[in-house]
Image (cartoon, coloured by chain):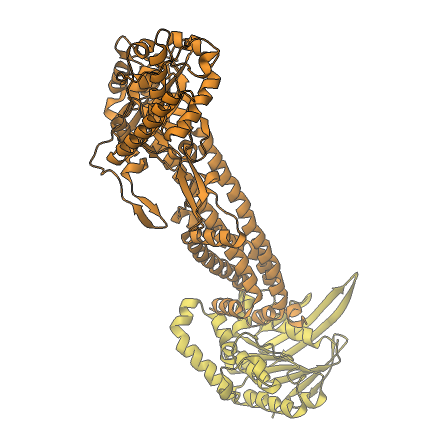
Chain colours: A orange, B yellow
Amino acid sequence: MYRLLLCLRYLRTRYIALACIISVMLGVATMIVVNSVMAGFASEMRDRLHNFLADIVVESRSLDGIRDSKSQMDVVEKAVGSFVEAMTPIVEVPGMITFTDPFSGEVFTSPVEILGIDPVGKAKVGPLYDYLDSYNPVIERGQIVRQALRSRDVPLSWELTDSAAARRHTIQELNALSLRRGAREQDFSPPTFDLPGGSAAETPDAAPSPQPDDSSGPVDSASETGAGEAGASDAGASDAGASDAGASDAGGAATGVIGSAETREATSETAIATDEDPFGDQFGSSPVEIQRGPLPARVYLAEGLVSFQTADPETKGLRKIMMVEPGDDIILTTVKASRPPDVVKFAATVVDSFRSGMNEYDTSIVLMNLEELQKNRGMIVAGQDAITSIHIRLKNYDDATEVVARLKAAFPPGMVHVRTWEEKQGLLLAAVEVETAILNVLLFLIIAVAGFGILAIFFMIVVEKTRDIGILKSLGASSGGVMSIFLSYGLALGFVGSSAGVLIGLLFVRYINEIEDGLSWLTGRKVFDEKIYYFFEIPTQVSPWMVFLVALGATSIAVLASVLPARRASRLHPVRALRYE
Amino acid sequence: MTETLRMTTPIIAAEAISKSYSKGAHKVPVLQGAGLRAMRGEFVSVIGQSGSGKSTLLHVMGLLDSPDVGEVLLQGERIDDLNQRARDQLRNQVFGFIFQFYHLLPELSLLENVMMPLMIRYSLREYWRRRKEIRDSAMDMIQQVGLSHRTLHRPSELSGGEMQRGAIARALVARPEILLADEPTGNLDSTTGCEIMELLTSLNQNSQLTIIMVTHDESIAGQAHRIVRLAEGRIQTVSQEDAA
C-alpha cells in the first residue's frame, strides 16, 4: 500500500518528474505522428498504385505485344477463370505528346506512356470513374465549384460532352475563317501536319488554293509540308491545313505556330514520310473540308501533363490552368509494331482529363481508345489484334500468388511477365517500407534517449530520497518494497507520459493538414509539397495496434530505465541512509 | 513458573556485540563486546560520548544493522541471524524507532506518516479491508501524543517538538514491544525535550513499553530506570537507580 501512496505522492510533488514525462510524451507523440503519416502515405500510395494497375498484370515482353487478344484472354480465362472478377486488354507503349499552350503559343512536347484501353473494361478492374474529370464535381476549398458533367449512370465512352463538342465547333469555325483568309492572302503557309489519323473522316473541300510547287521539293516544303502529296499540290496543301485545324485545338494563332514549327523540322524528311504514308492516297484524292467532328483517336489526358499551377491574383491561392481541354486536339507520336519500329504520328481528340492522385501517373499517362491505338500502331493483322498486357482484377486478392503461378504455367515460357501489382511496383513499395523502418529505429532511439533521461533523473531522486528510504526500512519496509516504489514510479511516469503522448500524437495526426497550413503560412514556404509527395493532402492512417505498441514500448523503456536506480535504492543500507545528510 | 520466566528473561538482549566499520584501508572498531539487556517494561538509557558506539548498538539491537560478532536475542531467541524478510517483519512489528531528526516523510501528512508502519505491514487488499481500523488506530495514537489538531499537516508545517511527537506516534502505532530512541531530544530545546521525555515516561508507565534510549545528556538519561554508560565500544558502568 505504502508503495502506491509514495509513488503517487512522489509523482505529484517532484517537478523533476515532469521532465521525464515530457520526454516520454514527445517521443511517443513523434512516433505516433510519423508512423501514422508513413502508414497513411504507404497505404494511400499502395491504393493508388493498385487501383491504377489492377491486381494482376500480364505483360508481353515486347512492345509489339502478343498476338490475338481474344485467344490470350481465353488462356487466362481457362487457367484462372474462377478467380477472376474482371479483366481487360491493354496496349501500353511509350510515346510523345505535342500540344500548344493557348496562352503563350508555345508548343510543348513531352514523353508519355500511352495506354490503349477499353474504358468500360478498364473501369471494371479499377476505379476509372473516380479519376475522370467529367464524372466528378470540382471542389475548391471545400466548396463545389462545378458539378459533375456526366452522371455515373452514363457508361464510360469516348464521346465528347455537349459543352466540349460545342467548344470544339466554335474553335474550328474560327480556325477555318483564319485559314481561308490566310489562303486567300497567301501571306503565310497553311499550318500542316502529316497526320494520317486525322484524315480518315475528312470530306472534300472545294476551296482552291493554288500552290505551284510540288510538295516533295525540299525548297518549298517550308510552305507546304508533309501532308502535301505528290500529284495533289493545291488540294494537298489545303488538306494539310484542314487536318491541322483538326489536330490543333488552341485557335488559329497557336495552330500557326505548331504548323510552322513542324514545317521547319519536316523539310528533310517530308519526301520519305509522304511516300510511306499509307493514307497518302486519301489526301490526294479527297478535297478537304473543315473537320468539325472529333477525330477517331480519342484520349483521356493525365491532368498533370497539360496543366500548370499559377498564383491567382484574386485569391492569392494556387490555381490550376488547363492548357488543353476536352474537345481540343493533340498530337501523339509513338512507334509502330513493326521491326524495326517506325515512327507513327497521329492527332487525337481530348475527351476528358483524369487525375489518379499518383503524381507519377498524373504527369505521364495518356489513356486512348484501344482499337485506334492498335490501328495506328499497325497491331491489327488479318483480323487479329495484338495487345501488350492484360489487367486482371481478382475476386479475392489473397489468391494472387496462386493465380500468378497458374498464369505463369498457362503461357508459353518467356512470352509474358505475370506479376501482381505489388511485384510490378516492388521497388517503390520497398523504398517506403525501408523508409518507415529506418524512421522507426531512429525515433525509437529518441525514446531510448528519454529513457536515459529517466535513468539520470531517477538516480537524482533516489539520492534525494535516500533518507526516506532509510526511514521506510527502519519501519520494516523490505528491499523489494522499496525497489517496487521506484519501479512503479517509473511505470507511472511512462504511463502518464505515453498517455499524454498518445493524446497529443493523435490530435496532431487529426489536425495535421491544418498544422501544415499553419506552418506553411508561418514559414512562407510549402512544407508538404504535393509535387514531391504525390499527394494533395497529407495522408494519415492510425493503427490502434501501432499506437498500443509505441505506448507499450515507451512505458517499458521508462520501467527499464528505473530498474537501476530502484535497485540502488533497495540496496541502500538503512543506517547509512538514515545518516545521509 | 511462566511468570518468573518472563520476569527473568530479558525481552531484548544484546550479547557481546562487536562491530567495526572500515574507513578506507583500516578498520575502525565501534563496538567491542558490548552487551545490553532490558526487561519488559524497563526504560534504559545508554549514555556515552559521540563515537562511543551507542547509536550503533541501538541499530544492531533494532536489526537495522548486523553485528560482526555477538547475538541479539528477543525473549531469549536469536534474531540477528534471521533472514531479511523476518528481520523486516520484526522491525515492523516488534520495534519502534525514533530519531534525533524525527525522520518523518516530507511528502506525507502527519496522519499518513503515522499510518505508514501499518501500510507497510498490510498488502493493498488487506489495507483496503482494514482501512478504517488502521486510520482509527493512527488517529488514536496521534491523540495520545497530543497532535489531533495537526493530522493533515505536512511535517514541514510542524514544530520540532510536534515532529518528534509525530515520530513517536508513528513508532508506536504498530503496537511494538520495544521502542528504540536515538537521541530523541537531541535537536530540541530543553522545555520541548522535557515534554518529550514526559511523554516517553508516561508511555513506559502506562503501557509497559520497553524503551531503550540513547543520549549524551546526563539529565535526560537520568529519567530512565537504569543508565548504561558506554565508552570505547564497551559497557563501562551500569548505574542501578532501581525501578520505581
- In the picture, measured across the screen, residue A139 lies left or right of residue B190, that is left
Q: Nearer the viewer, residue A259 or A382?
A: A259
Q: Nearer the viewer, residue A161 or A29?
A: A161
**Residue sitting at the far left:** A153
Q: Is residue A197 above or below residue A275?
A: below
Residue B25 horizontal/vertical position (percent): 79, 60
**Residue sitting at the far front:** A185
Instruction: For the C terminus of chain A, give its image quadrant.
Output: bottom right
The residue sitting at 75% across, 80% down in the picture is B49
The residue sitting at 64% across, 68% down in the picture is A577
Q: Locate residue B211: give its quadrant.
A: bottom right
Q: Is residue B35 visible?
A: yes
Q: Nearer the viewer, residue A167 or A305?
A: A167
Q: Is residue B42 above or below residue A241?
A: below
**Residue sitting at the far right:** B26
Residue A492 horizontal/vertical position (percent): 49, 61
- In the picture, measured across the screen, residue A386 lies left or right of residue B11, that is left
- In the picture, measured across the screen, residue A444 lies left or right of residue A381, that is right
Residue B53 horizontal/vertical position (percent): 72, 75
Q: Nearer the viewer, residue B100 or A428?
A: A428
Residue A468 horizontal/vertical position (percent): 59, 71
